[in-house]
């Protein structure tokens, strides 16, 4: 009942029963669902995500604490004396009960302190600061590529279903989905760098160029901000192959999903209504048909985005991309506990944030979700 | 009451649907005429091809699988089936309009009522040469259209999404969309089938008023004889892709000629208490292999030799009645 009262309009109704008993009944009025506005929905969704993040931090903390091995001992090495280890334990609150430990851990986390990596011997935040933007730039780039190509092929294949274009896109999609991204990476590298030779093979920019002053950590964006167009172009040339090899599978998958929902929706009565009432074909396809058809695709795109961040490892390796996925695998192989915690936290938080964005976009596309108060 | 010049003339329209097993010969030479200002009913069982007929007129048959295998559809002297693709919108925007069966699915669920309605109005106005219409003007037009259909609080409705409205309200929106400008012909495909009875009555009355006021011709597609009796001048009875009888509404009810029509009228339960009749034996034929000759003959009580081999043409009976049955001519 309380849950609903946040959402719609609750009216108090007096019900008088024989004998003079009066009940106050709360009724939820379905007819006021209009008041459940976009803003309110986003607000609720935000609160929801905060809970998810809180749960995530609890989980990670718990996992880090139940893992075998004494962090203090690991940090100081086997040569340290028992007193030194005990002193460090007290310093980093390991001698206190779990809830207190969690409090200290969360406090430093919120201050932006993730501890020190045992492998790079640097503060983890510094590592992340260096590697995360590289991967984010890459993933964002491949996301844009898959968005544009996936949607265009999906819409065309759906509208001209069972035509030669549909058949061709289906064939190419199957190949795209079936090819692992690192195979695609090696193939692209071979063709464009080695044989054709007009695209540089590795790294984020050519070594002879000086990277632009750091603002966002995205090289292309930073050099544009600094007005160095040559550097931006160079960065773009470097990013295009890895981004494409990550994107291919997603172009194929998202294109298929859009195609099938277009095919579903094109038979709906409302499309016929728009057509019969003389709405131009372009408007019918790209507005009235595309908007409802995008809903399943958007959900998949969100998952894909978070998925790539964690799985870009092989592609980053092939292109020598100094990115987060490579860092993540390296710290895991080195049993670098603090860094692992940070990595898991980042991946989890990315999932939560992307899901939030997806929910907001979907609720913008589909009023039924906002209005039926699902997930509130 | 109305002038005699034909507005829409369907001549020998045949449509088949290609399916895996073969061709479904759904329409088998339909003949139908609507005069200017006339209100015409088209009655038949579910699946007899009523909707296919109007979809052919509107050129929205899904093709493939549907294929028009013969016939002509003249609208004010022009054959609609021969129009080029880019000529069709002009007919849709100002001449022929339609209301579909299911109001629950004929509105786009992810756009507000106002957005859909205003876009439709905008294109229809453009067709009439009114290029620049302000948003405010469009909105007030949309609101007044809704008001005309008896919708309370149109301003609020414009901001709503279809799921926020009841079935009756949605059908009123559909009517507003269909009658956004003064169209010549309205094709109403069972506009009240999915609504409850009291709402049906209200909406039909309102629709009738609106059509009368605008002088629009209307083709009422329905399987309810009661609706036809009160709202139309003339009726066509359809059976398995054929027009079997047409007459002025009054004459048809007082003097039905075709065995199918007679059977149909008998199925209407009477308040005088004879109970419900047994109806017509058998069921609508399979379109994959429809019966040769008259498609009704396997169910007909007055079947003759000729009915099995030859398709009956429409015979004139009196001034305004035509019937496709060999009982009335050879």
Image: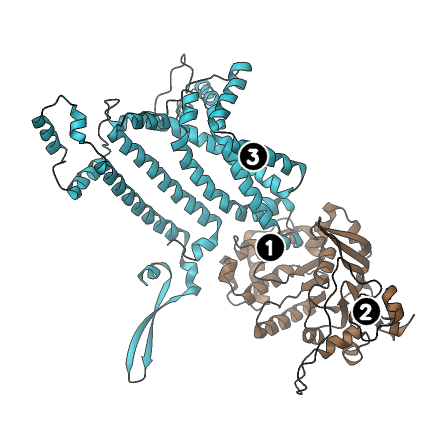
Real-space Cα distance between discs 2 and 3?
Answer: 53 Å
Residue corresponding to mark 3: A174
Answer yes or no: are tags 2 and 3 on the same subunit: no
Report which residue position mark 2 lands on. Answer: B297
Q: Residue furthest left?
A: A83
Rendering coords of residue A289 (x, y %)? 58, 48
The answer for which chain carries disc 1 is: A
Quadrant of the image occupied by residue B298: bottom right
Q: Chain of mark 2?
A: B
Q: Mark 3 vs mark 1: same chain?
A: yes
Residue at 66% over, 66% down: B190
Q: Mark 3 or 1 closer to N-term?
A: 3
> Please, is residue A225 above or below residue A43 in the view?
above
In-front residue for pair A257/A10 = A257
Residue B77 locus on image (x, y percent): 82, 56
Q: Could you tell whether A33 is left or right of B134 in the image? A: left
User: Quadrant where the C terminus of chain B lies?
Assistant: bottom right
Which residue is at 27% across, 44% downward? A54
Q: Colour of chain A?
A: cyan
What secondary structure is marked by label 2?
A: helix
Q: Which shade is chain B?
A: brown
| Residue on which disc 1 sits | A270
């Amino acid at each position: 009942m309380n849950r609903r009262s946040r959402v719609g309009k609750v009216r108090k109704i007096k019900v008088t029963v024989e004998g003079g008993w009066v009940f106050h009944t709360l009724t939820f009025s379905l007819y006021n669902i209009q008041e459940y506005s976009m803003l309110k929905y986003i607000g609720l969704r935000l609160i929801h995500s905060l809970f998810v993040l809180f749960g995530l931090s609890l989980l990670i903390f718990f996992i880090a604490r139940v893992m075998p091995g004494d962090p203090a001992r690991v940090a100081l090495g086997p040569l340290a004396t028992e007193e030194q280890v005990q002193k460090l334990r007290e310093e980093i609150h390991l001698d206190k009960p779990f809830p207190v430990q969690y409090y200290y851990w969360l406090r430093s986390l919120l201050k932006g302190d993730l501890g020190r990596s045992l492998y790079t011997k640097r503060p983890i935040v510094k590592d992340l600061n260096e590697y995360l933007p590289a991967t984010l730039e890459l993933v964002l780039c491949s996301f844009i590529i898959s968005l544009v190509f996936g949607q265009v092929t999906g819409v065309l294949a759906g509208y001209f279903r069972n035509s030669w274009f549909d058949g061709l896109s289906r064939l190419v999609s199957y190949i795209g989905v079936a090819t692992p991204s690192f195979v695609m990476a090696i193939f692209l590298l071979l063709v464009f760098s080695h044989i054709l030779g007009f695209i540089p093979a590795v790294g984020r920019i050519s070594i002879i160029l000086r990277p632009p002053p750091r603002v966002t950590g995205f090289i292309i964006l930073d050099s544009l901000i600094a007005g160095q167009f040559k550097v931006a172009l160079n960065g773009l040339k470097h990013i295009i192959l890895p981004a494409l090899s990550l994107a291919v599978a997603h172009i194929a998958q998202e294109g298929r999903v859009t195609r099938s929902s277009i095919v579903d929706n094109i038979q709906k009565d409302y499309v016929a209504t728009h057509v019969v009432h003389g709405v131009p074909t372009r408007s019918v396809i790209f507005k009235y048909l595309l908007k409802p058809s995008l809903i399943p695709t958007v959900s998949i795109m969100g998952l894909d985005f978070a998925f790539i961040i964690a799985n870009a490892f092989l592609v980053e390796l092939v292109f020598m991309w100094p990115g987060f996925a490579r860092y993540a695998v390296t710290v895991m192989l080195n049993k670098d506990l603090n860094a692992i915690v940070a990595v898991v936290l980042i991946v989890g938080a990315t999932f939560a944030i992307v899901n939030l964005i997806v929910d907001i976009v979907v609720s913008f596309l589909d009023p039924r979700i906002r209005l039926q108060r699902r997930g509130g | 009451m109305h002038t005699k010049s034909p507005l829409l003339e369907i001549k020998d329209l045949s449509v088949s649907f290609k399916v895996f097993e073969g061709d479904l010969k759904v329409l088998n030479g339909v003949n139908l005429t609507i005069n200017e200002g006339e209100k015409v009913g088209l009655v038949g069982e579910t699946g007899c091809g009523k909707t296919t007929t109007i979809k052919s007129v509107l050129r929205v048959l899904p093709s493939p699988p549907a294929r028009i295998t013969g016939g002509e559809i003249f609208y004010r002297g022009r054959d609609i089936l021969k129009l080029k693709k880019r000529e069709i919108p002009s007919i849709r925007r100002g001449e022929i309009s339609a209301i579909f069966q299911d109001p629950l699915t004929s509105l786009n669920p992810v756009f507000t009522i106002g957005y859909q309605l205003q876009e439709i109005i905008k294109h229809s106005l453009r067709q009439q040469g009114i290029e620049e219409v302000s948003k405010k003007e469009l909105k007030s037009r949309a609101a007044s259209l809704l008001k005309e259909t008896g919708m309370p609080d149109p301003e609020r409705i414009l901001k709503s999404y279809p799921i926020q409205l009841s079935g009756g309200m949605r059908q009123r929106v559909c009517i507003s969309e269909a009658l956004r400008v003064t169209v010549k012909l309205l094709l109403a495909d069972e506009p009240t089938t999915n609504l409850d009875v009291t709402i049906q009555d209200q909406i039909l009355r309102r629709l009738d008023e609106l059509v009368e006021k605008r002088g629009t011709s209307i083709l009422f597609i329905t399987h309810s004889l009661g609706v036809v009796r009160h709202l139309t001048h003339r009726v066509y009875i359809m059976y398995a892709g054929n027009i079997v009888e047409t007459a002025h509404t009054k004459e048809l009810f007082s003097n039905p000629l075709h065995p199918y029509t007679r059977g149909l009228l008998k199925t209407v339960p009477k308040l005088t208490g004879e109970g419900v009749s047994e109806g017509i034996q058998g069921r609508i034929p399979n379109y994959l292999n429809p019966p040769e000759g008259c498609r009704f003959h396997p169910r007909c009580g007055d079947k003759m030799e000729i009915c099995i081999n030859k398709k009956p043409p429409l015979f004139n009976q009196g001034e305004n009645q035509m019937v496709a049955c060999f009982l009335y001519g050879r």
